[in-house]
Image (tube, coloured by chain):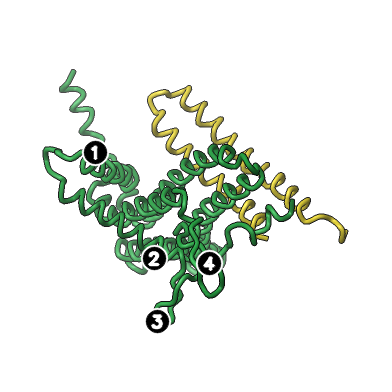
Chain colours: A yellow, B green
Amino acid sequence: MENIDPAFIKGIAIGLGAIGPAIGVGLVGASAVRSVARNPEAQGKVLSTAFIMAGLVDAVLAFVLLIVFTT
Amino acid sequence: MFDVFASSVGIPLAAEPVTDFFGLHITNSMIYGLIMAVIVVSLFTWAARRSSARPTSKFAFAVESLVEFVIGLGEDNFGSREKSLKYMPLLLTLFTFILFSNLCALIPGVSTINVATAEGQVPLLRAFTADLNATLAMAILTIGTVQVAAISARGFGGHAKHYFTLVSKNPFNPTNIFIGLIEVMGEFIRIMTLSMRLFGVIYAGEVLIHVVGELAGNFGWAATVPIYFMEIFFSCIQAYLFMMLAMVYIAMATTTEHDDHPEDHSEKDPVTPQRVSQAT
């Protein structure tokens, strides 16, 4: 276990940490598209809420990048 | 390969001191924050001087549209224009200041022009929001405002009731006290998430530009262009998000029970059928 390259661990961490936010952004986008398709008049409100939620989810990936790049 | 990810060649986590001012370390992010504050204040003062009922200046009109946009968002969240105008100064300041800090950090030269200090070469400027002290200060200010607004709107007892749910028959129900303690802890978690989100996104963006530039070698100038556009997008989203979250927290904390009563809505509702019947 001692001779594992730290860069390998960092790569694994980025890969695993990207899975969660990717699923989250996908869910947000899918729901936004679905609700816009059902109710096209509410597009502006739905999209602004969707961007907020995407920003909230993206922060998780930012935390992962932060931890990986700074250690 | 490992050198690319090491922070020693990239952007350090903490802001570095540039000069000393009577024993106070002036870091590069503080200089940048001061410059941004001066720019934002002077731009808005200039726009306020030029503002008039019949717009003559395009810039003043653009600033007015921005202010009106934030007030409109507040109207949606707070429910009334008076309440929106009451908290608008803080929200608008947060939005414009974070937006300017985020976007101006992408100007070439901001974190690449170095000055010589006793510790070696450090960048003269560093994005204000890429410093955890700055975002933590803004988050503490926001949550402090939320607490003050909640206490002034509902009183101290009402504010405590919001956490501990003392309305039930048994006020010292251990479950309520436990949930109340978790809610109080949630306020501190809000401070942490507000600050860490902004800091994490902006700092990770700076590091990402650096890493992509290093990985692309001679073609770093081309490889970083998409990352720059992504950073512009994230800068706007994060500034908007910080303001929206502050707004939602204040709106959640200042709603009194009076607003939630169904009687209020039933008073308004009979008006609309009459209008409809008059129209038809």
Which residue is painted at 31% across and 52% down in the image? Answer: B92
Mark 4, residue position? B181
Circles 4 and 3 on the same chain: yes
In this view, the residue in front, B34 or B68, is: B34
Rendered residue at 45%/44% (across/down): B237
Q: How many marks?
A: 4
How far apart are labels 1 and 2 at the CA level?
34 Å
**What is the x, y in percent for residue B148?**
34, 66
3 vs 2, front mark: 3
Depth check, mark 2 against mark 4: the one in front is: 2
Where does label 1 land, which residue?
B268
Q: Position of residue B219 (x, y in %)?
A: 61, 39
Residue B41 in sight here: yes
Residue B278 screen position, x and y as percent: 15, 22
Q: Chain of mark 2?
A: B
Q: Are marks 1 and 3 on the same chain?
A: yes
Is disc 2 placed on a helix, strand or loop?
helix
Q: Distance of mark 3 from mark 2, alpha carbons? A: 29 Å
Tell me the kind of residue under disc 2: Gly
Nearer mark to the viewer, of 1 and 2: 2
- Residue A24's disc is none
Which residue does the numbered mark 3 point to in the structure image? B22
Q: Which residue is mark 2?
A: B144
